[in-house]
Image (cartoon, rainbow, N blue to C red):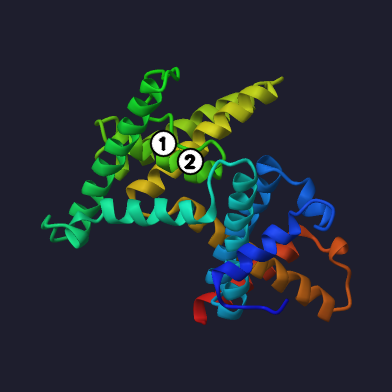
Amino acid sequence: MKPGKNIQDLIAIMARLRTPEIGCPWDLKQDFRSIAPYTIEEAYEVADAIERGDFDDLKDELGDLLLQVVFYAQMASEEDRFEFGDVVEAITGKLIRRHPHIFGDLDLSDAAAVKERWDEIKAEEKAERAAKRSANGEAVEPGSLLADVPVALPALTRAEKLQKRAGKVGFDWNDPRAVLAKIREEIAELEEEIAKPEHAAERVEDEVGDLLFAVANLARHLKVEPETALMHANAKFVRRFGHIESAFEARGRPLKDATLDEMEALWAEAKENERKA
């Protein structure tokens, strides 16, 4: 079998890998739950390739992510649940439904109006699915406004989505400075907990969590994606720490013998170099 550009080639390869007795032992062993962590990992690798501007790598990573979709569809097909074509039909139908200003006669003039209508249609679809499950005899509990924010999301991203969802019904600050005041309050509470002679680790963790949640809220109010901001901060840390490592390597000294003052000076130097660049 040779590589091909047709999606059917990928579907056929996946089916071959999952064929009992002649397929791949590892692929045959997998199920929906075991593959899920790989899907999350592949999505992050796509984001990483985009961040680095590496489009050759992005092409490969998108292929890896597409494989995840085909893998799930193959397993679902084996259980007579759905096939890859049903996945395509579902997403094309959703895109048509959620873009009535493109595929219908609704007039929406700006991105904000489009997003508002998208959310309305999404809520309507959710209600329809709940009604369908109820009609089929399934138990449907009254859904919380926050119920469908995925638990598996990165914590910062989920915090932002929870806050945004609550904000839709008015449970929100209307000024970033109010969020800053909340952050100061959370820092004060953390300092108070740490100052206790025998502070409880659970309480400290709780206060740190409150602080991070408040910072995520500030990022949202400032229209900054918190996960992206932290990703950039991580990259900055790696870059500047690399400058410290390189400097000591050039001096022929092991980094473990460095003083904090020496490392701080090199950190400041790396920071200044970035500013000039």
Per the rendering, the mark at residue 162 is 1
Residue beneath the point at 67% across and 52% down:
38
Closest to the observer: 216 or 33? Answer: 33
Closest to the observer: 107 or 146? Answer: 107
Crowd band around label 2 with a 10 angstrom C-alpha radius: few (<14), some (14–19), many (20+): some
Residue 107 screen position, x and y as percent = 10, 58
Residue beneath the point at 48% across and 56% down:
85
Residue beneath the point at 40% across and 26% down:
133
Q: Quadrant of residue 246?
A: bottom right
Tell me if 174 is positioned left or right of 50 in this view: left
Whether tag 1 and tag 2 are in contact, CB under 8 A, the answer is: yes
Per the rendering, the mark at residue 158 is 2
Residue beneath the point at 50% across and 36% down:
211
The secondary element bearing badge 2 is classed as helix
Closest to the observer: 270 or 146? Answer: 146
Crowd band around label 1 with a 10 angstrom C-alpha radius: few (<14), some (14–19), many (20+): some
Name the quadrant of the N terminus. Answer: bottom right
Q: Is there any visible trace of residue 40 in the rendered image?
A: no
Residue 266 screen position, x and y as percent = 69, 70
Tell me if 108 is positioned left or right of 55 in this view: left
The secondary element bearing badge 1 is classed as helix
Q: Is there any visible trace of residue 28 in the rendered image?
A: yes
Q: Label 1 sits on what residue type?
A: Leu
